[in-house]
Image (tube, rainbow, N blue to C red):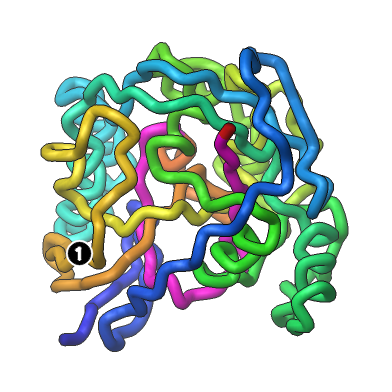
């Protein structure tokens, strides 16, 4: 089977054709930190392996995904954006991606710790040194220690998480950490504000930015850069229909690589989920929404893909 991926205006950004992607799963490591019974919102701790600060996301329900009405608004906005481009094929693929956010549902998650920031270049360099691996080829702006790590694929991210005694977040863990329990549109609220994240919607960016640059864009739990700067790899296989049958308690994504058809584009199998939008994304703000789902060949490395990790009590 060949997976057909073409770049479209809805941020699929998928290129080339190739074999079914690897199903290799990382082995879970032992946690380097102690559990903390009674943790509450605002609590933080540091992972002793990589020095990453972690913030607490308490157990409980949250609203995941989007309603029919919310998706209809996004489709209408996207149609206005595409008006005059005469690209019905791109629009159909875009609507298909929005539809994968449905149905909105109440999901329960156990409590967990999530990295306050994306994994930085300095943290990843320590991992590379400790595991005797080379740093990937640097982006055009070079390696800056306090910028998010980029040029890493899904397995690089999973290997780092294992080394650090944590894991990649599930799609559900990522979304709750970004939006809280009230179903908000962006980490900071319902209104778009380009000043609260690293993005190219109004002003074209030329690189990633330091992870501490946008404190006003914090999520309800204090996680930063949940919108913009870099797309973040999640643990899950991508399935456009997963929400229709996913468990309501601690959903972990499909148990194996999923084959699916991208409307107007062809078939693919084995994509992994990314979330959050990036500095490079220069269309408009829909990709920075907490509910937006992005997917990609997990072997790909690019200058706007990064990650953060989670740990459980």
Within the image, what quadrant is residue 80 found in?
A: top left
- Where is residue 270 shown, x and y percent of the image? 28, 70
The answer to if 293 sits in the magenta stretch is yes
Residue closest to the eye, 61 or 120: 61
Residue at the spot 15% in from the left edge and 64% down from the top edge: 260
Residue at the spot 15% in from the left edge and 47% down from the top edge: 241
The answer to if 180 sits in the magenta stretch is no
Q: Which residue is mark 1?
A: 258
In which quadrant of the rendered image does the C terminus lie? top right
Residue at the spot 37% in from the left edge and 19% down from the top edge: 62
- Where is residue 219 shown, x and y percent of the image? 60, 23
> Residues in magenta?
289-312
Within the image, what quadrant is residue 248 found in?
A: top left
Task: Mark yes or no: residue 198 visible.
Answer: yes
- Where is residue 298 shown, x and y percent of the image? 43, 70
Residue closest to the eye, 291 or 223: 223
Residue at the spot 37% in from the left edge and 77% down from the top edge: 15
């Amino acid at each position: 089977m060949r997976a057909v991926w073409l770049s479209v205006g809805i941020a699929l950004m998928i290129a080339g054709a190739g074999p079914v992607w690897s199903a290799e799963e990382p082995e879970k490591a032992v946690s380097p930190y102690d559990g903390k019974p009674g943790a509450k919102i605002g609590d933080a701790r540091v992972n002793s392996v990589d020095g990453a600060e972690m913030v607490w996301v308490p157990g409980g329900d949250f609203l995941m995904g989007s309603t029919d009405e919310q998706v209809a608004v996004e489709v209408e906005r996207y149609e206005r954006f595409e008006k005059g481009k005469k690209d019905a094929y791109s629009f159909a693929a875009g609507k298909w991606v929005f539809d994968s956010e449905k149905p909105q549902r109440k999901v329960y998650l156990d409590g967990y710790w999530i990295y306050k920031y994306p994994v930085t270049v300095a943290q990843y360099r320590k991992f590379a040194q400790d595991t005797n691996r080379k740093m990937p080829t640097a982006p055009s702006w070079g390696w800056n220690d306090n910028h998010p790590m980029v040029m890493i694929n899904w397995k690089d991210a999973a290997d780092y998480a294992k080394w650090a005694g944590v894991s990649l977040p599930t799609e559900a863990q990522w979304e709750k950490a970004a939006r809280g329990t009230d179903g908000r549109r962006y980490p900071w609220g319902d209104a778009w504000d380009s000043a609260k994240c690293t993005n190219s919607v109004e002003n074209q960016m030329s690189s990633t930015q330091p992870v501490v640059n946008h404190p006003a864009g914090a999520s309800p739990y204090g996680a930063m850069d949940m919108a913009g700067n870099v797309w973040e790899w999640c643990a899950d296989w991508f399935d456009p229909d997963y929400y229709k049958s996913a468990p309501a308690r601690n959903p972990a994504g499909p148990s194996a690589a999923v084959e699916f058809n991208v409307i107007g584009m062809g078939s693919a199998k084995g994509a992994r989920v990314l979330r959050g939008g990036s500095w490079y994304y220069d269309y408009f703000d829909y990709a920075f929404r907490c509910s937006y789902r992005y997917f990609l060949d997990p072997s790909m490395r690019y200058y706007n893909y990064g990650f953060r990790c989670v740990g459980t009590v």
